[in-house]
Amino acid sequence: MPIEVDGKTLETDEEGYLVNLSDWVPGVAEVMAKEDDLELTQDHWDIINFLREYYEEYQIAPAVRVLTKAVGKRLGKEKGNSKYLYGLFPYGPGKQACRYAGLPKPTGCV
Amino acid sequence: MAKANFEVPELKEHPEVPKIEPGAMAHLETFKAKPEFMEALGFPGELSDNWQEQAIDAMGDMLKKYRSLQVYMDSCVKCGACTDKCHYYLGTKDPKNMPVARQDLMRKVYRRYFTFAGKYFPKLVGATDFTQEVLDDWYNYYHQCSQCRRCSVFCPYGIDTAEISMAAREIMDRIGLGDKYSNEIIGKVFRIGNNLGLPGPALEDTLEGLEEDVFDDTGVEVKYPLDQKGVDILLVTPSADFFAEPHVDGLIGYGKVFHEAGVSWTMSSKASEAANFGMFIGSYENMRKVSQRIREAALELGVKRIIFGECGHAWRVAYAFLNTLAGPWDFLDQNYPVPQHILEFTLGELEKGTLNIDKSANDDMVLTFHDSCNVARATRMGDKPGGQFEIPRAVIKAVCNNYVDMPEDTIREATFCCGGGGGLLTDDLMELRVKGAKPRMEALKSVTEEYGVTHMAAICAICKSQFTKVIPYYGFDMDQIVSVHQLVSNALILSGQNSEDEDDESEEDAA
């Protein structure tokens, strides 16, 4: 199912992840969040931006522990746990946040 | 937790066999693999016009290669013993999820093309042509079997539905029809080294992070080495252990145990995956290729021993098939089991007394243990029959004060699958996964209510991920699932470890 972002049609896979990672613009996250009835706040954007930075360096989404630790360091200890992240992204930070950030879905026994 | 767009089964006080609902799960078809994923595994990219002929050829080939398959096709007497044994039938009510019906999807085609009666009098013996409709049923219902082999325990002839479902998937792959989840993942192992696609630098960064965390917690420099040559032990563990919760807490535990035991060890970026999804798709060739990476890594690193981390089907492949797939292992130290399970190693150290254990560290929990299907019914641990049941329990009891088993007909060799094994741990099968977890959830609920159980420990990456995702549908909390080595880690006091008073982080856990 393709999505419409800023007047452009972008290709996504069966599960709604962007097919071409280079297609990503902030509008992608906005459009996807709207489909999930979720309003993106700065808290969401902090996570999305971190995911994109991490991916750029390591070519993979960060492990849950890496993500919570980084969030704790940057945004305060009380936010460095998976409960906080699930609160922001109810479908799971690993999957929903990655999708908004334009990253491929983590596969395997996760 | 995501909203469910299907009906979550209601947990009953006593499990009951549901009334059948024909076609209840006929709609559930897992995503198909794209041509590029198929071709990377040596299969045709898509179905061709003569797929039927190819499928019958492939079936004939497999009947010759695996005599067991032919025996299973011929020997069912329709006694009905298996009908109420499959967690997917119990959870979905779809009669095609009864093991005998799942087998019959292949049996009716087998009879049509490979038996005298079926060739000449098909209607008399329930034989049918391999039509598109039959193939669609194969695809849907052979991807609703987690190959857990519970039914085979109760079958008087020992018919192994798992083997039939593996053969069916292999036949489908050979005609160009494969599932996305397993096949994409196997391709990632070939390309990158593990199911997740974690490249070396990401592994390194993750492991460094763990070293920091353990140091912050304990004041002890426990190492989590990667690609270190000349050490004694190669640890092969599921890549989920690097990535997911509570898996990573188990990995922290393995490292602490090795540290205290004083052995030298490493992980490998080439063999950064214990899982072997080649088994799920029944493909000997892919299973062999995945296994070869472990052999190559062991040789390159010059290790003397191989130990497997907490992964259910990996232990089946390791325990039962590794010698055939990637042996001979004559270059390893024959004084140790080849390969060894991490629980065997840890129990050995506990018995030797090298580990300083404070069981009260786990006093905030009342534990139970989920026997993983592949470990329970396809392997052994230690040198006594039933070791695969006793050793995990012995380790848990050595590090925890409060332990209770779930009802006897739901554990050990009669254990219920978590509902996500056999290559079904994918979001597009969430309905099946949630419904298939029902028998385990009923058992968990009963010990929760009767004995105040708070946590369920598991020794399989799939079980851990499956449960953390599905138990919220049944009113439990995802934190109630723990790794066995997480419990070991909690209780293990490292030599030179900070005393608790200095540990200002301990409050965090309570949050």
Image: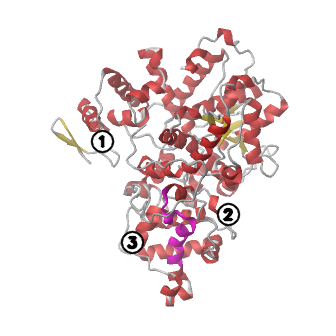
The verdict on residue B105 being magenta is yes
Q: Crowdedness of circle 3 by 10 Å Cα count: few (<14), some, many (20+)?
A: few
The verdict on residue B106 being magenta is yes
For the point 54% across and 82% down, the residue is B114
Q: On what subunit does the disc labeled 2 rest?
A: B
For the point 30% across and 41% down, the residue is A20
The three-letter code of the residue at mark 2 reads Phe
Q: Crowdedness of circle 1 by 10 Å Cα count: few (<14), some, many (20+)?
A: some
Image disc number at residue B133: 3
Magenta region, residue range = B92-110
Q: On what subunit does the disc labeled 3 rest?
A: B
The residue at the far left in this view is A7
Q: Position of residue B46 (x, y in %)?
A: 37, 63
**Pointer 2 with pointer 3, Cβ within 8 A:** no
Q: On what subunit does the disc labeled 1 rest?
A: A
Mark 1 and mark 3: span between their CA atoms?
Answer: 35 Å
**Pointer 2 with pointer 1, Cβ within 8 A:** no
Reading the chain from its start, which is encountered first: label 2 or label 3?
Answer: 3
Secondary structure beneath label 2: helix
Image disc number at residue B154: 2
* Residue named by callout 1: A20
The three-letter code of the residue at mark 1 reads Asn
Q: Position of residue B439 (x, y in %)?
A: 58, 50
The three-letter code of the residue at mark 3 reads Glu
Above or below: residue B254 compared with residue B462? above
